[in-house]
Image (cartoon, grey):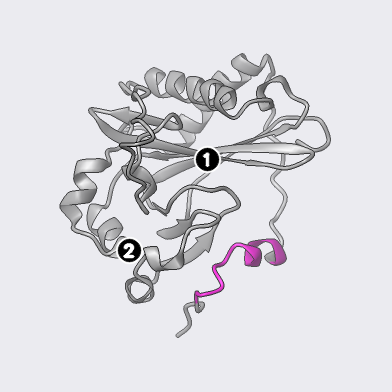
Amino acid sequence: MAAAGRPALFAYTWPRPTAVLGYGQPVEDIDLEACRRLQIEVLRRITGGAGVVHSGDLAVSLALPASHPWAGRIAGLYDRFLGALGGALGDAGAEVRRPDPPSAKSRRRSPICFEDQAADTLTIGGRKAVGCAQARRKAAVLVHAAILLGLDADLYAAVFGVDAERIRRALAPAVTGVTPDDLAGRIARRLGEALDLAPRPPEAPPVADRFLDRYRDPHWAPLTA
């Protein structure tokens, strides 16, 4: 859709806990044995950044034609996208904010996406609640976000081989008591207003297995009985 000249918004949840690595992230950043034991599939996304355990969150992706005014600058796209997300979360009762990013010298890159607080972040009470990333191609640009609506700190800790208290100190749900469908509707309205477009829900096409298989990490052995 974006390559054809039309912005497209996708909002979705995951049917079961799934670990997703950033495009260039080492698979050694996670505990594959723990993932096998807990029946957690491991995938790799097309955008950079660090790992996310999708469980109790809402994923939101906005695809734009490369010629769209929002698509020109990386920082500008984050500003507009997170502005709409922050507005929708505020409508739902959340008190999220953009943090002041650490300096390049002091910044410590974590293998866990939600431990990093940079310009592509929304926080609540000093803990990260929304993380974003982008992918840029010749014809289109994609920006996406993971919005925490719950937190299983023990599960997160097992996947990354860290203490659960470390997860609780770094992560927090953006808002509670709101369904993914309700929040997705609020986000669609806010982005529609910002883009000066009326959201129209299309019939979602099925995703072919050949596309899904591209993003399964080559180190991962599919879970079988």
Name the outermost residue toward the front: 105
Identify the disc placed on residue 153.
Answer: none
- Nearer to the camera, 76 or 93: 76
| 138 in relation to 157, above or below | above
Where residue 40 sits in the image (x, y, percent)? 40, 67
Looking at the image, residue 221 sits to the left or right of residue 5; the answer is: left
Residue found at x 54% / y 59%: 44
Residue found at x 71% / y 66%: 210
Residue found at x 38% / y 75%: 36
Q: Quadrant of the N terminus?
A: top right
Where residue 161 sits in the image (x, y, percent)? 27, 64
> Can see residue 1?
no
Name the outermost residue toward the left: 165
Q: Give the residue pinned by disc 1.
A: 133
Q: Mark 1 and 2 residues: CB-CB less than 8 Å, in contact?
A: no
Label 2 environment density (alpha carbons within 10 Å; few <14, some 14–19, many ≥20): many
Identity, as a three-letter code, of the amino acid under mark 2: Val
| 59 in relation to 99, above or below | below
| 76 in relation to 28, above or below | above
| 16 in relation to 113, above or below | below
Label 1 environment density (alpha carbons within 10 Å; few <14, some 14–19, many ≥20): many
> Which of the two discs, 1 and 2, labels the residue nearer the N terminus?
1
Part of the protein shown in magenta? 210-220
Residue found at x 63% / y 26%: 73
Identity, as a three-letter code, of the amino acid under mark 1: Ala
Q: Quadrant of residue 27?
A: bottom left
Q: Give the residue pinned by disc 2.
A: 159
Describe the element under mark 1 as helix, strand or loop.
Answer: strand
Looking at the image, residue 55 sits to the left or right of residue 25; the answer is: left
